[in-house]
Amino acid sequence: MRVGVLDTWLSNRYLPFWEPYFEALEVEVVPPMDAEVRLPMPLPIRRVLQKVYGLKNQGVDYLLLPDVQLGVEPQRGNPTPWMVDLAATLERLVPGLPPALVVPAELSPNLVGLAAEIGQTLTRNPMLARRALERTKRLLETSFKPPKQPGKRLIGLVAQPMLAEDTLWLEGLRNALSAQGLNLFLADKAPAELRQEGQKLGLELELPTDLEAAGMHRYLSRMGRIEGLIYAHDPDYLPLPRPLRRLLRRWPPAKPFQVVGLEEAWESAVKALAESLA
């Protein structure tokens, strides 16, 4: 039995349990070998497709995919399917996709039942699933570790968390900031804490990732050592929530800021921001 896993799209939030659990189940964990995909999509979206096509070509039996909204279904608006149902979106775009195992993109002791169910699905052996879960369930209780970050000339990023944790996508932004003597700063609070920050804005947001992005805005806006802010946004794939965009227009933060698209030339956007800091 072979299960393919992504190494993007919040994978660092859920794989610390699922990979060791699959190994304890004696299931082969298959990392992606990127396939070539030429589609007019922003880089973070295209990379997900490259990895999924790669896993399909590698002949996996199942594909482990995250539910980034943690089971919350939107009741208002028309959010992009990439944010609310990754599995169904990929099924439409990738013919012959292996069946998906969808798990919350966040670990919790409450996932023991789901893990047992998935373990039995993969092994058809309740005893093996039980033993594997006993050995690994402690990993469901993970603690947040803030990233190590530079301390001077800091520019905060506000974006959907799938972007804020995409190291390859961030590389271009970091390089452009560095060329102007600036450093990228990512919100150093746990996702649940950022969602609480977002709730305090009173924007009536439903989706956890929208709340997290709003929490980045509230938290970074009031941090004195953050000199400026960059809001990364793509209306078709990874938009910032509309109420937050309205808030930016009506009550912009006191700090200089730039709103940029995912395919923007970082150099020009960062240069404009640097000039406003002078």
Image (tube, helix red, strand yellow):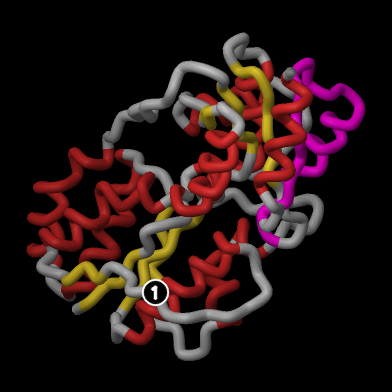
Label 1: which residue?
Answer: 34
Vertical position of residue 102 compared to residue 157: above or below: below
Q: Is residue 120 above or below residue 58?
A: above
Specify whether 59 is left or right of 231: left
Counting from the top left corner in percent of width and height, residue 269 is at 73, 41
**Residue in view at x 61 percent, y 31 percent:** 180
The quadrant holding residue 53 is bottom left
Where are the magenta residues, as a range? 237-262
Residue 115 lies, in percent from the top left, at 28, 56
Q: Residue furthest top?
A: 224
Mark 1 element type: loop
Q: Is residue 195 magenta?
A: no
Q: Is residue 121 visible?
A: no
Residue 218 place in picture, x, y as percent: 67, 22
Quadrant of the rendered image containing residue 132: bottom left
Q: Is residue 65 left or right of residue 268?
A: left
Within-10-Å neighbours for mark 1: few <14, some 14–19, many 20+: some
Please give the name of the residue rendered at 91% of the width and 27% of the height, measured from the top-left corner.
250
Q: Residue at x 12, y 71 (%)?
A: 125
- The number of numbered badges drawn on the structure is 1
Whether residue 259 is situated above or below residue 132 in the rendered picture:
above
Foreground of the two, 41 or 71: 41
- Report x, y in % for residue 229: 68, 28
Q: Residue at x 52, y 42 (%)?
A: 175
Nearest the camera: 29 or 258? 258
Q: Amino acid at mark 1?
A: Asp
Question: Is there any visible trace of residue 190 in the rendered image?
Answer: yes
Residue extending furthest toward the bottom: 96
Quarter in which the N terminus is drawn = bottom left
Q: Quadrant of the C terminus?
A: top right
